[in-house]
Amino acid sequence: MLKNIEHLYRRWRAMGEGLGSVTSDDVAMTKELLSDAEFGLWRAMSSADQVHSVQVLRIFEKWEPDATRDEKSAALLHDVAKAISPMSRMARSVATICSFRRERWRWYRHHEEMGVEALQRVGSSKRTIDLVRRSALDAVALRLYEADDSV
């Protein structure tokens, strides 16, 4: 729980300071890496979530230079379901830490499963889906999860 709170604090603080923006090079790289349908899901994400996903990918590639296309796709798409129910920074913080009865907050706490459903609908690979679900536990998968938790 403490690790989740530390990660949340870093993300919350970065969102308040402004994460920057996705460059045209970032968009071109993402478009090349993802299928057209996956790219459409990625483009539906908020700019802050797009920036975060690119940051996660860059860290992951540094730690795992031989990562496959499917593994890199998971780095970009791990938060794709957040686009379905966009929430304010404060609402995300509360939803991450607390269990509430409000449906949209309960949903947010399980956004990975919603992302899995979206990725299944667009035909993403099993490897990408398993990584977004966080059900893969091999060394490469653990590095991806670590990259996500680091920013």
Image (spheres, rainbow, N blue to C red):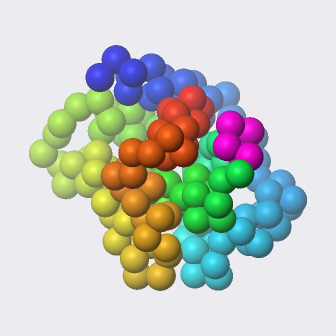
Q: Position of residue 145 (x, y in %)?
A: 49, 40
Q: Is residue 40 visible?
A: no
Q: Which residues are magenta?
A: 61-65
Above or below for 97 versus 142 = above
**Residue furthest left as drawn:** 101
- Residue 121, by quadrant, is bottom left
Question: In the image, is 122 to the left or to the right of 67?
Answer: left
Question: Which residue is nearer to you in this view: 72 or 9?
Answer: 72
Name the residue at 40% across, 60% down.
Answer: 130
Name the residue at 57% across, 29% down.
Answer: 150
Q: Position of residue 38 (x, y in %)?
A: 57, 74
Give the main secondary structure, helix, strand or loop, of the magenta stretch.
helix
Question: In the image, is 139 to the left or to the right of 29?
Answer: left
Name the residue at 79% across, 63% down.
Answer: 29
Above or below for 138 versus 79 = above
Q: Position of residue 57 (x, y in %)?
A: 67, 48
Name the residue at 62% across, 50% down.
Answer: 53
Question: Which residue is nearer to you in this view: 113 or 91?
Answer: 113
Quadrant in which the N terminus is drawn = top left
Q: Position of residue 25 (x, y in %)?
A: 87, 59
- Residue 33, by quadrant, is bottom right
